[in-house]
Amino acid sequence: MARGWLGRAIARGRSPAHAGAVTLHPTRSDRETIARLDAIAQAALVRTGQVGPGDLVEVAVARIEEFDGELNAVVTTTFDRARAAVAAGLPDGPFTGVPYLLKDLASEAAGVRFCEGSRFLRDNVSAVDSENVVRLRDAGLVLLGKTNTPEFGMRPTAEPVLFGPTRNPWDRSRTTGGSSGGSAAAVAAGLVPVAHANDAGGSIRIPASACGLFGLKPTRARNPLGPLYGDAFGGWAAEHVLTRSVRDSAAVLDVTRGPMPGDPYAVPEPERPYADEVGRPPGRLRVAWTATPAEGRPLHPECRAALERTLTLLEDLGHDLVERDLVELTPRVGEAIGTVYGAATTWVLEYWSRLLGREPDPDELDPFTWALVEHGCRVTAGQYLLAVTDLQAFSRQVAAVFADVDVWVSPTLAQPPLPLGLMVATADDPWHGNAESADMLGFPLVVANITGNPAMSLPLHWSADGLPVGVHVLAPFAREDVLFRLAGQLEEAAPWAGRWPPYS
């Protein structure tokens, strides 16, 4: 039951005295009550006058100060800027006063340190706002800081040398996944209700699974990457958020979606706001599924149990199921994926070297980054374009699958979140941890990035020892509406909102 000033006010259905823009310094029990609310519910408190925007900010600041010393999710804070923004008056938007955190990768906030997890950028400060950040601010969200990420987002765990590891609030000896691991830990522990994330190979969906969150990767070009980028990784990268509720994810996508002038890709506009899809019946879907990881990799029993539980739930909800592998990841496709990642890492380094006017010193990059750069430097222009050709042919094969089915379901990961340290490179072995990473990523989440299709991870299972295990759903191109309808149905049928990690 809600306790304290806020709990009593909510229970009575009346606005507490002095609500509005005045900060009331909520008690610990009030902070706990607010932290349990999603972003839409927090915004409703401000809109109805039960709290002021400053109250929400101070609650989040207090929780970051209390919990993040152990989690290491937040690597840069902007508390004073947030308070100044509240004092100056926030935009009147759907999320006015709601605090959020920005992943320290790709999206920039002018005047705020921007490191991308690299010692090479440790003193870098952003000169411009990314369009994504502008739209979040115009919706009334208040930036409180930046979250941890592996160097340049190239590892599925948030353990950069620069800032050290982010710890999973479900088990602080475990990874949060990556690359949006800092954002995932912050939302899972209730530091903020929503945090920015991005995904060029699973970086929204991996930490969503590892931290028990809802994570949707939108369709290619649904959200802009400008003004600094037209695309990233040849169109693989997508911007969005990590949330606890499906409705938060849909409502945030409604305020960020839409192209910037000059964007290199186009995507069909949705028929209606995504927020209106949550709760709308999805109809009787044709669901393809597989329990077979790629390349004969092992599947953990808990990940199999997560899939089986979800399939039973889908069948009970009236959907039609058919067991079917997606499209084979042939050696040629695997080689093409490696070519793109090597070339992309080299592009990142060339980009920053040109901007900073110098190349990195040997000790300013992680060993794994150096290894990827060396690989990328051996890729010729012709080899890169040949890889793109192969991957576009693969995309057409995947598109053909969706002529017969509506969605494709698998476990998100082939293992629950691994112990910290297993996926970290060493100077002697820059590829150390690759085998563990590959086994955890037994299901090819990168397919959604190659094709541009939307995909999501849902927190539908917890292991016997209390670790979250996600289930992954891939949809046809531009069909986020299908995902939000199905996610809303599953969230109602198997609610996860009451599950909170021990460290929260």
Image (cartoon, helix red, strand yellow):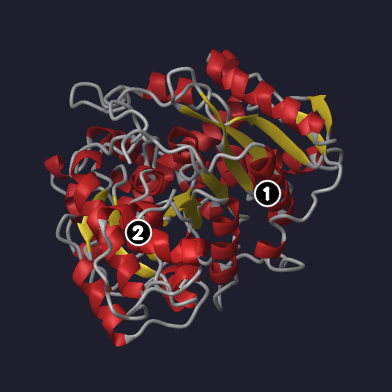
Residue at 50%, 48% in the rendered image:
244
- Residue 301 in view: yes
Percent of width and height locating residue 440: 47, 24
Residue at 54%, 18% in the rendered image:
302
Vertically, is 107 above or below 497? below
Q: Quadrant of residue 392?
A: top right
Q: Earlier in the sequence, mark 1 or mark 2?
A: 2
Q: Relative to residue 484, is residue 203 drawn left or right?
A: left
Q: Relative to residue 457, is residue 85 drawn left or right?
A: left
Q: Amino acid at mark 1?
A: Gly
- Residue marked by disc 1: 488
Vertically, is 387 above or below 461? below
Mark 2 surroundings: few (<14), some (14-19) or many (≥20) residues within 10 A = many
Residue at 27%, 39% in the rendered image:
166
Mark 1 surroundings: few (<14), some (14-19) or many (≥20) residues within 10 A = many
Percent of width and height locating residue 76: 21, 57
